[in-house]
């Protein structure tokens, strides 16, 4: 994309004529908003309003809607005059009817949903469908044209906006922040986006903090803070605060339009200076607007003697009991007519308010950016085999697997300099992904010092100690058609779990909308896992995100547990090419044994699971006495070691080792598209032989996945059972009873055959565990590290 | 507690003698910190340091530790001089060795762990145990005396501090905020605690923002922001910012001591004014300190030509390879000796640095507040039966169940005016708990307006639109021995799920420490559930927290799904009396059918699950053809309705209805103490009859809980399967295939007997579902609400 606007173009405040057009559009939007909340018939109010015209169930949120529409109108006028590409993000997403109204007025609604025509009949349909079964949701959801932000779970409007404008130099994201939302932690943590935004390469975010004083049942902190504190707060965040306050008309139009002109010109000046080399390198003071209007502005001022407009009571449906209460019905009619619909719609119900509406793709409800990026390119990816570990024998080399991924991502950065980013809370190096820093520095717009490493204004590796920012930025980045990875400590992925949930929900809903382009998947890489946070301790040991993922619809949920570097490369390649999924990849960063050649790994990952014949001793289709299954790197190590112990000490026991890379092969095919057919499942796990399953996460995850498989009770799952501290890696497996010795004893206890040497082997295992316990008790840091034991393939 | 300090007492800055004592204590603490990271022998450095004295694995975080110890020393001096009760919260909890060192110096460590004597031998043990198997964790964890905050998952230091001082007028919580932590969303969202802190009734929090410029591998935003922006930011949050910067000594001691004196005097002035009626009612401008010191202050300045002190490179272990590299070994010795240990410890290794250490319980490492409140009182609770719904027949009355709980909590407020609070994101009224507002207003310290409802400075109902603040405040409140409830929308409980996880982990670890008092349970009430967010839509529909809870240890995890008001009252009474649990209670707030009398409910909840004979038609011990099980209010309604349909239309089919209140009765007793014995489980679910289980949450939760029960595959679980939108309550059950009609068809498909009328009934169910679908398609908002259908007990 190129700059379509002459940067020195003069944008003047609106004249009276333009203000009248702005006001008409705004009134039309509010009329349509009230209509959506209340009416099922008589949309144009051509007849006197009766109870029959009123919906039986009144749903929707009025309070925030007038402000949302007011800002929308003014931004539309800005776009019309300048050609500026904009998207609009409504933080208070419950103001959904205002955004639906905007899209209908702009025509995009009818283009996408031809049933909802742009006339009286369509208007009636628009009203009836809102918040009704078979209709549309009440929020600015996936069904709303121009939206990349639902605004249901509050807090993410700025992270989505910042993500959308990264590497998107011509885009201006106007983000309305409600003062309720402004109280949430994720929102408060997201103002710092400008400390990472490069004016030369990135677009701009214009936050509009909408202070209407109240949330659902009381005042807001920012709404009641002294204005000088509010100014100081945002000056402290680095913004240039422009304030507009009032409810007088047309005065508010003039003042807000002037504020918008001022902000836009500052943004243009910042960008022009950065893009023409005139920039001094200091972080720009980006403008933001603090807009103070009454909550429920222009709605009923007082009902039954109680103040409504300007209070929390206008949050949802300000007039209730309209079907039963004639006085309220009259108030509603008066309210709607106060917008003078006959000036806004012709006799056929067609809107006559086009004066401020931009053309075509410039309409915010039709922005290609918001539709997932119509022309969203695939990533240029080199053959991942070139980063492979050269493997001769399984279980010999110790490699930091994620370092190979780092090499791959380095080249992804090099080959996709405008469409790929890595987001990581301060751990790129720690996660062994540091090779990307040879392709791009870390981004940082605050002051730089000579001693800084791999840090610059031009950097595009995103590090901020905030899972919320990282996750949210990536969401905004992918929803506008670009690609990325969020890499984080496994335990702290729970910090942003709610974002993973909400993004999954967004994708689930978008899949059924043909007009939404498929967007690049959200790739989440969990390194620094529970098993190897032995140095950090219990708070850093928590594989909970896997379970959260399993709750989402099979269409979007993907969970991968590559056991080694080559499998990781194959999985990553697949994920980076995919769209519309949430891909969870779990692998630790510490040196770990390597098992498969790159060709074996590729085939293994394509199958999702497979038998490792070299590890067990039951050949081919031979029925084993016990299946030793594993998923995840540490459980795989312990399983392979357990199988080795069994091979060496009880060779008569026929063991089969099955490794699972793609967790979603476990459920039945009816429950997940990756689910193995009955035949393939049986080929791996048999129908009736007991399975000792060593799992990376909480055991319940496997229990729920195999439910419904033949004789699911035979799956004996070992996993993380919430024991840990600062200790050694091997002690972690002992504490959680998943060590090789525990697995051997499990195999002996559950195999069908009773072999002569079994008791002796059991005794040996207990002895080894006792020896370990004694070391822990008596020797502390001198504990020998059993993890280093050589694992060998079957000779 | 009463004021122990004369409010007009004059606290002077320290003289040279005091500064020397401060410095000695600080040096001793740093010596002990370095020792913990590096040494396994030669603790007092009485011999020349050799590789043999060095631990084989070097773990720990040096960078933040000197700053933590510096602040600790100065606060100790303040306490010694004034008698001020203080607790200390280390946001950067990875500075654990500094806090362990402080406790050892203060003697409390040896009091609690007598093995770790306060002499050379104990010092060696202190060093050896740190970050080793069988030793102690690297963070300020549960094992650290005086700690209520682990600081592993960053972001919660201020919420814990604010929670600790609520209703704790004599307590000052000193909360060190690291500049890495300051980037997290939860931390940024927590500065606003002062907008809810009443100086007359609550204690005070003194935040010390420790800007040492760097986190693990790069600079921090606040560390690099212009100082005037930092000042503006915190002035905007409402603080009076006191700044101290430098590394010069003893200058820094003098300046920081003066800053601390100034802050303490301001706090005392604010409190004195509020407590003597001289307060003007404006929110005080509480002081905070911005402390700028080099990262790794006093540590190696440069190693191998690379700057360490003052850079991110001092974050963890600044000198590596000490066993192998003689130059590094020499540097370490020089570094440790720079603290002049012979001045700090006598020849037996006993510390001689008592000058700044307060007495007894005033030592921060021995604070009764941090030990869970030694004298933590139980709540005064009235007989919960007085709030009961008077029930004649099951399934007739529609009652908002949580409104009864609101009445109960109102009286809890009245009877426990200093030891109970409700925390809720802006939804107390919406959640039908509004009766509490007749006992106490909402707390709000920003400006008040005449039109505000139930809002005052004196209020103690905590509403802030931040799950993170609500959850964290309650944690701080209970960890200091008081009681409370966090009530929130079910879906948005995932926002703070990571806090639930970390608090569960804290409790899990504390259970094995006899010196930690049992603290009141963390009670989480989820209202506005998935099934009844029909008006808000898909983003508000997510029962994910149940699954998160199931991952924790059985000792702390409790999950209750009361089906009606009387069960809710019984469950709530139990939870409010309990300690050391995380109690999750899930029930919707909308009018719902009532099933049990208060006596039946009490017995039902005590058993955890039971057969509802009035709903099914298999009498007593008679073997049913199918078991209809349910957990949760909406699933119970649909199950009872399904049983009714079956009774009326296919009376030959013997059905048993089992309701589960306590979800943890499902696992085996070996897996959870509430798990039903085999005998009781069989009595409810039989050993082999199929069970159609209608569950409130994601079906996988039940699948994992019944794993290992007899023939677990026979449990056919219906639950929330991630379908929803803005629709009707009944349509929600249809979308998720858990409606009465689906349950009837499930029963027919899985019962062992084939009855003549089954096909006809199946057809009827499909017809009813088709009729529903047609309504949704064609009639939109006119859809009849099937939910209102009368449910009747067996006549």
Image (cartoon, coloured by chain):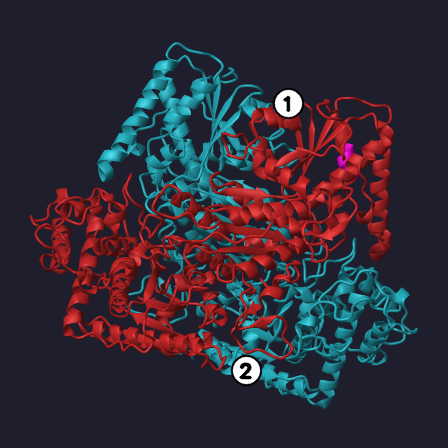
Chain colours: A red, B cyan
Return the residue nearer the eye: B672 or A103: A103
Give the quarter of the image for residue A599. Answer: top right
Q: Position of residue A725 (x, y in %)?
A: 71, 53
- The span from disc 1 to disc 2 (Cα, nearest Å) is 70 Å
Q: Position of residue A432 (x, y in %)?
A: 67, 58
Magenta residues? A741-745
Image point (49%, 71%), residue name: A195
The residue nearer to you, when weighing A272 against A453, is A272
Q: Secondary structure at mark 2?
A: strand
Is A620 placed left or right of A348 in the picture? Answer: right
| Vertical relation: A401 (above or below) A712 | below
Task: Give the image quarter of residue A210.
Answer: bottom left
Quadrant placement of the N terminus of chain B: bottom right
Percent coordinates x, y for residue A746 in the rendering: 75, 32
Nearest to the eye among marks 1 and 2: give it. 1
Identify residue for label 2.
B242
């Amino acid at each position: 994309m190129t700059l379509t606007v002459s940067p020195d173009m003069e944008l003047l405040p609106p004249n009276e004529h333009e203000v009248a057009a702005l006001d008409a559009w705004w009134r039309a939007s509010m009329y349509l908003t009230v209509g959506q909340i209340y009416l099922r018939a008589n949309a144009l109010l051509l007849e006197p309003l009766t109870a029959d015209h009123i919906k039986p169930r009144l749903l929707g949120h009025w309070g925030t809607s007038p402000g949302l529409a007011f800002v929308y109108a003014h931004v539309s006028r800005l776009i019309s005059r300048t050609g500026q590409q904009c998207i609009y993000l409504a933080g208070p997403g419950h103001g959904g009817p205002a955004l639906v109204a905007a899209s209908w007025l702009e025509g995009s609604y009818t283009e996408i949903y031809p049933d909802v025509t742009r006339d009286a009949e369509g208007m009636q349909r628009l009203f009836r469908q809102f918040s009704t079964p078979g209709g549309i949701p009440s929020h600015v959801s996936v069904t709303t044209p121009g939206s990349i932000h639902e605004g249901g779970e509050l807090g993410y409007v700025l992270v989505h906006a910042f993500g959308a404008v990264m590497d998107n130099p011509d885009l201006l994201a106007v983000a309305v922040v409600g003062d309720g939302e402004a109280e949430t932690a994720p929102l408060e943590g997201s103002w710092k986006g400008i400390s990472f935004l490069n004016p030369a390469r990135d677009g701009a975010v214009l936050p509009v903090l909408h202070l209407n004083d109240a949330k659902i049942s009381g005042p807001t902190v920012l709404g009641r803070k002294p204005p000088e504190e509010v100014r100081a707060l945002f000056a402290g965040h680095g913004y240039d605060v422009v304030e507009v306050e009032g409810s007088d008309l047309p005065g508010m139009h003039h003042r807000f339009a002037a504020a918008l002109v001022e902000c836009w010109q500052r943004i243009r000046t910042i960008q022009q200076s950065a893009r023409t080399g005139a920039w001094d390198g200091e972080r720009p003071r980006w403008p933001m607007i603090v807009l103070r209007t009454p909550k429920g502005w222009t709605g009923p001022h007082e009902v039954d003697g109680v103040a409504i407009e300007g209070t929390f009571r206008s949050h949802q449906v300000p007039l209730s009991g309209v079907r039963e209460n004639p006085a309220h019905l009259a108030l509603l009619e008066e309210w709607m007519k106060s917008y003078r619909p006959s000036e806004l719609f012709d006799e056929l119900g067609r809107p006559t308010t086009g004066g401020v509406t931009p053309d075509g793709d410039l309409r915010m409800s039709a922005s290609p950016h918001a539709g997932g990026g119509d022309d969203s390119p695939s990533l240029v990816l080199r053959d991942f085999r070139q980063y492979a570990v050269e493997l001769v024998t399984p279980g010999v080399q110790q490699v930091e697997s994620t370092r190979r991924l780092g090499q791959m991502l380095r080249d992804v950065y090099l080959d996709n300099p405008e469409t790929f980013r890595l987001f990581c809370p301060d751990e790129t190096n720690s996660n062994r992904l540091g090779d990307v820093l040879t392709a791009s520095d870390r981004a940082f717009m605050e002051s730089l010092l000579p001693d800084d490493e791999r840090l610059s204004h031009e950097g595009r590796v995103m590090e901020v100690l905030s899972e919320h920012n990282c996750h949210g930025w990536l969401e905004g980045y992918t929803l506008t058609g670009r690609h990325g990875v969020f890499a984080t400590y496994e335990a702290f992925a729970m910090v942003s779990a709610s974002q993973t949930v909400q993004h999954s929900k967004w994708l689930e809903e978008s899949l059924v909308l043909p007009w939404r382009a498929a967007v690049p998947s959200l790739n989440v890489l969990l390194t620094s896992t529970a098993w190897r946070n032995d140095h950090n301790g219990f708070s850093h040991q928590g594989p909970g995100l896997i379970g959260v993922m399993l709750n989402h619809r099979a269409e979007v949920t993907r969970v991968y547990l590559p056991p080694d570097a080559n499998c990781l490369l194959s999985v990553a390649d697949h994920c980076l090419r995919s769209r519309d999924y949430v891909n969870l990849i779990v692998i630790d960063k510490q040196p770990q044994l390597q098992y498969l050649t790159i060709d074996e790994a590729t085939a293994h990952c394509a199958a999702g699971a497979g038998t490792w014949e070299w590890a067990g001793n039951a050949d081919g289709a031979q029925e084993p006495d016990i299946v030793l299954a594993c998923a995840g790197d540490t459980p795989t190590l312990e399983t392979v070691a357990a199988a080795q112990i069994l091979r060496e000490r009880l060779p008569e026991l026929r063991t089969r080792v099955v490794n699972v890379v793609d967790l979603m092969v476990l459920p039945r095919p009816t429950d997940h598209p990756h689910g193995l057919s009955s035949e393939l499942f049986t080929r791996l796990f048999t129908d009736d032989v007991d399975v000792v399953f060593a799992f990376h996460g909480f055991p319940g995850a496997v229990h729920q996945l195999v439910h419904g498989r033949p004789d699911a009770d035979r799956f004996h799952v070992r996993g993380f059972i919430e024991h840990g501290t600062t200790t050694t890696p091997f002690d972690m497996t002992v504490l959680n009873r998943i060590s090789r010795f525990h697995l051997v004893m499990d195999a002996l206890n559950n195999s069908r055959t009773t072999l002569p040497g079994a008791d002796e082997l059991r005794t040996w295992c207990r002895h080894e565990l006792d020896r370990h316990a004694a070391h822990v008790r008596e020797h502390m840091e001198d504990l020998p590290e059993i993890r280093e034991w050589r694992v060998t393939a079957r000779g």
